[in-house]
Amino acid sequence: MARALFSHCLLVSNSSPRLASSLRSLGGKNWKMSPSIRRHRSLIGHSGCGFRCHCSVSLSQTAAPETSSSSVRKRIVSGVQPTGSIHLGNYLGAIKNWIALQNTYETLFFIVDLHAITLPYDTQQLSKATRDTAAIYLACGVDTSKMQASVFVQSHVRAHVELMWLLSSATPIGWLNRMIQFKEKSRKAGDENVGVALLTYPVLMASDILLYQSDFVPVGEDQKQHLELTRELAERVNYLYGGRKWKKLGGRGGAIFKVPEPLIPPAGARVMSLTDGVSKMSKSAPSDQSRINLLDPKDVIVNKIKRCKTDSFPGLEFDNPERPECNNLLSIYQLMSGKTKEEVAEECHNMNWGTFKSVLTDALIEHLHPIQVRYTEIISDSTYLDKVLAEGASKAGDIADATLNNVYQAMGFLRR
């Protein structure tokens, strides 16, 4: 996982039967594709979306947690772009879901400031945006008083960059060359204006996940293949350096990386634009009128809902393909009010748009007000925020360093 969790998503060409052959050729004569890679290659070979970054969740409910007799909690990692401005789509589609997971899993939430410099950025705003985004996450309900929940800044844990370099040596260049975003961005900007980071971004993405031996990464149903690059890289490194090879170097042997699984919440409503019911709510949309930002003041919310796009059909209803705006606004009301779909359908069936917009506005303001109050408290107390981020980085660093030391050892580096 503000652009939702690594949300300037990277897409890779999905019709790639050459993937297995590139693995073999780059892995040596003895490279054998694991059952996991064979299984997931078949997925990407018949999909229309290919790879994207692993974090944009556009669903409205949290997944049913797995139960275990063990007292050891499964681990989840989620990251978010440091934009300092998070809209309702980010919150309802991803953040609210991730935060609920802290009750069941060990959760690591981090601000991906290293990813933010992949494309041109404002150096004067990066630090402020990072702090603002962290404060919003905390205001939304991340509870760092619980031992299993942490918030930190990606660049505060140097192992992210170190592991990225080590993984780069095992990443076939063909995998990266197929990334659609790199092709599109480099074509627009020209080779002289595009940094290498845009090409190698997916390796850092994999490092973010593998460093923490993550059990799960939250993804939407339509994005469960976004983990494939990370999963295949984990499988490749485990094969090239793990097992008996690692044991002969004095290590414990076995797998170096845990291969993470997608955690897919139950399907729910996607939050769409207020000006176009068939487009997702997005920070990149040119008009701020298209989205509700979590920190929008009351008068701004009133104005945006008053001016949002509707239709001329009588009454209000869900799931009519000819009424995308109606379905979107009802869905937002359902999520803001906490009511069931059936309850909302019955309540709003005979409403006109004027009445419903007033009801929706009140629900939005009531839901967002506590978040806004808490955000103001956090952002005005720099000592508290710095303490939370420092403690989060320390905890994350302990986990990351253990993984990084294993990788160095397995790859044959001289022990420090």
Image (cartoon, rainbow, N blue to C red):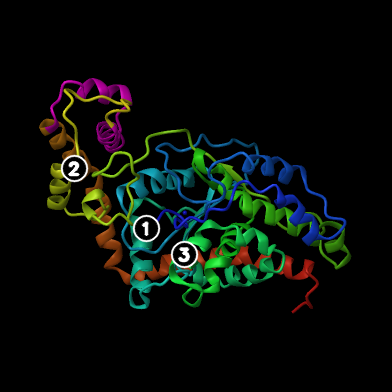
Q: Position of residue 36 (x, y in %)?
A: 72, 44
Q: Is residue 98 left or right of residue 348?
A: right
Task: Work out how far the residue at label 1 is from the one at label 2, CA to CA, in angstroms.
Answer: 22 Å
- Dot 3 falls on a residue whose secondary structure is helix
Residue underneath mark 2: 308
Q: Quadrant of the C terminus?
A: bottom right
**The magenta stretch spans residue 336:** yes
Q: Is residue 211 visible?
A: no
Count of numbered badges drawn on the protein: 3
Q: Position of residue 182 (x, y in %)?
A: 52, 63
Please name whichever residue, 367 or 395, is drawn nearer the observer in this view of the structure. Answer: 367
Task: Work out how far the residue at label 3 is from the one at label 2, CA to CA, in angstroms.
Answer: 32 Å
Q: Which residues are magenta?
A: 324-353
Q: Is residue 410 left or right of residue 86?
A: right
Identify the residue at image location x=27%, y=30%: 323
**The magenta stretch spans residue 101:** no
Identify the residue at image location x=56%, y=66%: 199
Residue underneath mark 3: 185
Mark closest to the chain's N terminus, 3 or 1: 1
Q: Is residue 213 left or right of residue 98?
A: right
Please name whichever residue, 239 or 282, is drawn nearer the observer in this view of the structure. Answer: 282
Identify the residue at image location x=84%, y=60%: 28
Type of amino acid under label 3? Lys
Specify the quadrant of the image occupied by residue 164. Answer: bottom right
- Dot 1 falls on a residue whose secondary structure is loop
Q: Would you say the magenta stretch is mainly helix, strand or loop?
A: helix
Label 3 neighbour load within 10 Å: few <14, some 14-19, many 20+: some
Mark closest to the chain's N terminus, 1 or 2: 1
Residue underneath mark 1: 2
Q: Vertical placement of 35 versus 384: above or below?
A: above
Type of amino acid under label 2? Cys
Q: Name the mark on residue 143.
A: none
